[in-house]
Image (cartoon, helix red, strand yellow):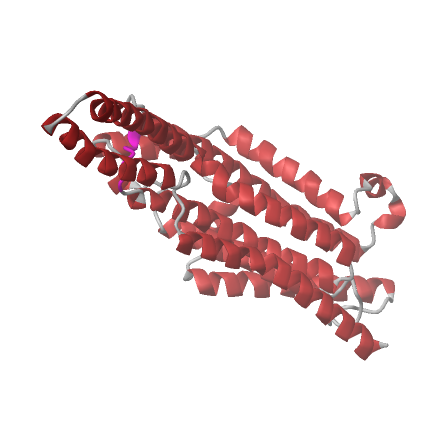
Amino acid sequence: MAETEASPAPRAWFVRLAQAIPLAPAWTGIAVAAFVYGLFVLWDQAFAAVSGQAAHWRFWQSGGARTEPGFAVLIGFFFFSIQRSIGSGSSLDDLRPVLQCSDAEHANLVRELASSDPKFQRVAGLVGVLVGLAVLTDGNLSQLLERATWNHHFAWRAACTSLVFWILGVFIFWEVRLSRFLMRVQRELVQIDLMDLSPLVPFAHRSLRGLLFLLIGSSIGILVMAVGGALGASALVVLATVLVGAISLFFPLRGLHHRIREAKRRELELVNEKVRRERARILESEGPDAEAAAGTLPGLLAYKQFVESVREWPIDSSTLLRFALYLGLPIGSWLGGALVERLLDLVLD
């Protein structure tokens, strides 16, 4: 891979904001969640005082208001995750032992990965906002143009939804770009050894780390929707999350998958050629030559069987188990949210 010189792109505004908070990641998440919910209480009380309407700052008072603590927790989680990712270094650091390149080439790869056009990030964020508003309005974006839609509770939820989906849109852009980058790295800088694929497992672990952020964030969002009474919409989000989760794990590994499959094909061609040659020696020769071929053939057949059994994805059983447990997060969140929503309705009714 040719060395490239690329200057790091400016960080997204929410990353710079998270970086500016002088707290540990866990405390940052708690502080942001408390701040966001505090803003909602002030917003709700101010409009209640002005309009003479009842305030709904207690989450159990209405289905809509029950979503506000969930929004606060979700935004706090995002800032917690962003701070942790800032301190964890480049996505290529854990993969350094696997890459066949010099330290200078690795440093260039890190700089290249960190560089991207900010315009693409903004476009991804805007697309995320449109998707979020579509979810908020059950796909009827024309509601946003109706005056009756815009009470102060809807305005707050629209603002929180826009923020959450902006961050998700930029995150998905980063993950897609990283996946394409890693597939190129896998083609050019990774050596395939069919006898031992364990050095390639860190690529799967890297996919799981990004997937965990997505699934935890989605699980909180699904819980918010379910507690708010949107059980049907949240069920669709669960299905979409599981599908996106599977894509997020396997898509970044396609480069290695193709490399392993090609290595197996070439190895099997060589073994089959040797098997045919030793078989011909047995059938056409006599004496020591035939006996030597007869002694070699079982080993070749055993090796052929071994090559055929090599898995074509660099994913071990522990990674698959963790992946299955991760996928249980949004499903459990939906079930828990539905239960909480039913219990609240029973208590309030």
Report x, y in % for residue 348: 82, 77
Identify the residue shown where x is 29% and y is 44%.
Answer: 199
Identify the residue shown where x is 35% and y is 46%.
Answer: 201
Question: Is residue 93 among what the camera can see?
Answer: no
Report x, y in % for residue 215: 56, 53
Quarter of the image where the C terminus is located: bottom right
- Farthest residue to the left: give it: 288
- Quadrant in which residue 147 is drawn: top right
Is residue 147 left or right of 83 when viewed as pictured?
Answer: right
270 or 163: which is nearer to us?
Answer: 270
- The chief SS type of the magenta part is loop
Question: Is residue 294 among what the camera can see?
Answer: yes
Q: Which residues are magenta?
A: 189-195
- Farthest residue to the bottom: give it: 347
298 or 288: which is nearer to us?
Answer: 288
Identify the residue shown where x is 83% and y is 50%.
Answer: 150
Picture layout, residue 322 above or below residue 55? above
- Quadrant in which residue 139 is drawn: top right
Report x, y in % for residue 161: 68, 50
209 or 113: which is nearer to us?
Answer: 209
Is residue 60 left or right of 301 when viewed as pictured?
Answer: right
- Quadrant in which residue 11 is drawn: top left
- Magenta span contains residue 58: no
Report x, y in % for residue 170: 55, 40
- Magenta span contains residue 192: yes
Picture layout, residue 334 above or below residue 293? below
